[in-house]
Amino acid sequence: MESTQITSVGIIVKPNHAEASATASEISAWLAARGIAMIGEPIPADAIKPENELTLDADLIVVLGGDGTMISTARLVGDQDVLVLGVNYGSLGYLTDFRIEEMFPALESIISGQYEIDRREMLTAEHWRGDECLVTGRVLNDVVINKSALARIIDIEVKLNGLFVNTFRADGLIVATPTGSTAYNLSAGGPIIFPSMNAVVLTPICPFTLTNRPIVVPDDARIDLTLENENEGVVLSLDGQTGYTMKAGDKVVIHKSKTTFNLVQPENRNYFDVLRDKLKWGR
């Protein structure tokens, strides 16, 4: 993605957050003073529904909130090749790299063309029941098949580019991007993957066989997950924000998305700053 001349900006705000809404008004006035169009009104992140994805025809999207708001935004932008500036209220997030006091200097830099882009890969997941595709969604973090608290252990067959990998007997399975490696994957014992790596990690959740360990695979591979055994309460989750009930024989097909999620990256800050802060390394 080449340096883009910013002529239009959209704003996504954390729902029911008065300070974020007030900041959105300040940004609108700031943009107007510089002759830059704001696309529509600020959109609350909870207005982004899986069955009715919004589109925002903007050169830049400013996200005011936390990582959850950013994940919702990733679903919003769809296949658009758009810049995203994440502004957090409080401590740094994994995705919202800028503090509120850094926001306007960052906007000045972006408008002048002085910025770096952190391109985060996304995955597309399709939920199939026989010959019918029930749902298609894009994820920034992870695709998860998980059983309910009372359901029995489940069997999930995994194929990679058509080759049989294993049938995991477990409470579930996580397919995570490098971005999502610090989310549910990390809690389940999976590895941290540097964000720019071209990789995907498959992590079983509480596997029945302890030798079933996480597997790191190429991000351009097609991954087929088939729920083998009849069980109640099994759910397909996309980024932990949308869920769909699965039945025995259902298949989830996962492949790399055509476009990336393009985050504006602050100067003089690296990924390990966030890891040290969030994971409390050295404390």
Image: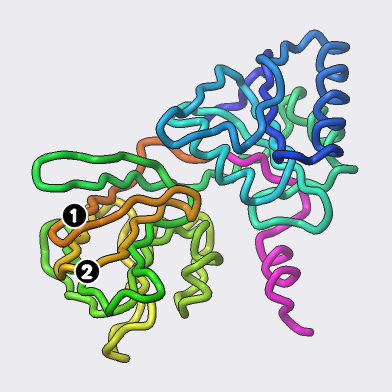
What range of the chain is rendered magenta?
Answer: 262-283
Residue 221 in picture, x, y percent from top left = 25, 54
Q: Where is residue 18? Give x, y as percent.
A: 84, 37
Badge 2: how crowded within 10 Å, few (<14), some, or many (20+)?
some
227 relative position to 184: left or right: left
Residue 154 among those drawn in magenta? no
User: Is 280 or 220 nearer to us in this picture?
Assistant: 280
Residue situated in front as seen by the camera: 60 or 169: 169
Q: Residue furthest top?
A: 35
Residue on which disc 2 sits? 231
Does 130 sit left or right of 87 as displayed? left
Position above or below: 110 against 283: above
The residue singled out by tag 1 in the image is 251
Q: Quadrant of residue 263?
A: top right
Say which amino acid is labelled 2: Asn
- 130, above or below 113, in the image: below
**Would you say 256 lies left or right of 54 here?**
left
- Residue 250 vs 272, above or below: the answer is above
Name the element at disc 2: loop
The amino acid beneath tag 1 is Lys
